[in-house]
Image (cartoon, rainbow, N blue to C red):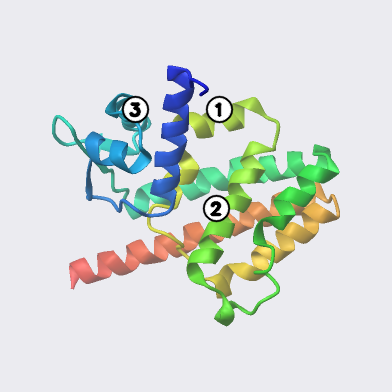
Amino acid sequence: MSIIRKGALTEIVYERITQMLYDGLFPPGTPMTRKELAEKLSVSPTPVGEALARLVGEGIVEQTEKSIYQVKEFSHKNLESLYAMRAGLEGIAVRLCTENAADIVIDEICSSFDGLLEKSAADLDIHAYMNADQRFHRKIVRFCDNPYIINYNKSYEFMLRSYQKGLLRRPEETIEEHRSIIVAIKFRDGVAAQQKMTEHHLATCRVIRRMMSEEDGKTGS
């Protein structure tokens, strides 16, 4: 039986907990313990504690008691700032991918929505579409071949933070945007891919600002 090094096991546990957070298994405010997560992942509490400490350091999770943690809730203002940052970073990342990545990488990025973009928005499964959305954007960052962008996401998990409240815009608002970005990538048009990705995220910023305005109106009424 192979032995997994301590550091490697912690990284595996970190990735699995991160995926659980992407999947919304622990909504903000839901308590989670090292023991509970260790049982779910069939590992000892030690690598779980190390992974949680890393997530605390990244500002994703907060420790409320000695062994109890919860996902930190981000305000709409936080999310607006995250999507504005994504507009810039992912705009550059998708341009780098489009202009420089190997054909096999381009195919992998463009396959993220396989079987979904051919459907009408009304026929889409929301959960499946959100998973595809996450895959698509995470692949762009992973394959941009820019260590600063990649490490910035690893250090701050801005992708994970921005999905905390799920999809902020419905598929009928974003499906055509995703189609147009993928077309630009397939045709190796880096300028168009960058412009379309930037506008894609800035459109979400506008939606978030509208949400904040509506919340302010209700508070003031």
At a point 64% along the width and 26% down the height, the residue shown is 147
Q: Identity of the amino acid at label 2?
A: Gln
Instruction: Look at mark 1 in the image and give the residue it sits on.
Output: 151
Whichever of labels 2 and 1 marks the residue nearer the N terminus, that label is 2
Front residue (pair 139, 75): 139
Whichever of labels 3 and 1 marks the residue nearer the N terminus, that label is 3
Q: Identity of the amino acid at label 1?
A: Asn
Q: Position of residue 89 (x, y in %)?
A: 60, 40
| Quadrant of residue 218 within the rendered picture | bottom left
Cα separation, mark 2 vs mark 1, equals 18 Å
CB contact under 8 Å: marks 3 and 1? no
Instruction: Look at mark 3 in the image and give the residue it sits on.
Output: 57
Between tags 2 and 1, which lies in front? 2
Query: Vertically, is 210 above or below 192?
Result: below
Q: Identity of the amino acid at label 3?
A: Gly
At a point 29% along the width and 44% down the height, the residue shown is 71
Asked whether residue 81 is in view, the answer is no
Q: Is residue 118 left or right of residue 36?
A: right
Instruction: Look at mark 2 in the image and give the residue it sits on.
Output: 134
Residue placed farthest to the left in the image?
A: 65
Cα separation, mark 3 vs mark 2, equals 23 Å
Cα separation, mark 3 vs mark 1, equals 15 Å
Provide the secondary structure element on which disc 1 rests. helix
